Amino acid sequence: MEKDADSTGNGSATAQGKKRSIQDDDCRSATPDGDYFPAGRLFEYQWPVGDDTAEHYMLQEQVAEFLDIRGIQRKYPDLERRTLDVEERKYLVGRGVVSETFSNMGLVALCSDQVLELMAADYPRKYQEYMDVLEEREFQTALKKKILETRSMGCLACV
């Protein structure tokens, strides 16, 4: 696979016709309107929900924004893709991942494993940024669980 020149965060992003320099250590992705799509906004989910054997997915639109890829279907035609069904769109709207309007625009799901492989190979800094977010989420989940366990035992000082 060909590596994108801006995949390491070097280059510039345009916002309303003005060039904005992105520093070498800045892994944020610029969206077409000049905003940034942070790794923490990538939503990875299992579908169907509740099925422990179900695949994990990410939205193609979010992945493309995070990696700053225009034409992701042309650049990575071999990625497994599928159009979201009605229930899946409702689930994502209910979770606040996408708006009702955006959900009706033909969203596409990508297999998470393939996305992570692509990121690790072609966008290592973006991959690390996402891995850092996942690690922080796991830490916060474990901390909340510990707090709840401690509260149920009646020992707030144990935290």
Image: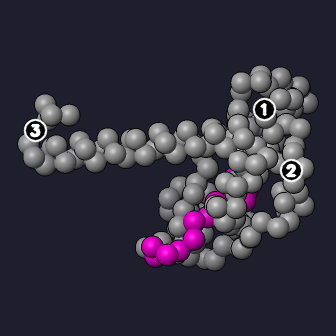
Dot 2 amino acid type = Arg
Q: Quadrant of the C terminus?
A: top left
- Residue 155's mark? 3
What is the span of residues highlighted in magenta in the rendered image? 51-62
Q: Residue at x 72, y 49 (%)?
A: 119
In-front residue for pair 41/113: 113
Relative to 78, residue 37 above or below = above
- Residue 30's mark? none
Q: Position of residue 102 (x, y in %)?
A: 68, 60
Q: Position of residue 32 (x, y in %)?
A: 81, 42
Q: Determine which residue is flagged by label 1.
A: 9
Pick whichever of labels 2 and 3 is earlier in the sequence. 2
Q: Determine which residue is flagged by label 2.
A: 70
Q: Is residue 61 magenta?
A: yes
Pick whichever of labels 1 and 2 is earlier in the sequence. 1
Q: CA distance from mark 2 to mark 3?
A: 53 Å
Q: CA distance from mark 1 to mark 2?
A: 15 Å
In-front residue for pair 80/91: 80
Q: Is residue 56 magenta?
A: yes
Q: Quadrant of the N terminus?
A: bottom right
Can residue 102 be seen from the camera position used here?
no
Mark 3 nearby-residue class (10 Å; few <14, some 14–19, many ≥20): few
CB-based contact (under 8 Å), mark 3 and mark 1:
no
Q: Residue at x 70, y 32 (%)?
A: 27
Displayed quadrant of residue 78: bottom right
Dot 3 amino acid type = Cys
Q: Is residue 121 rendered to the left or right of residue 45?
A: right
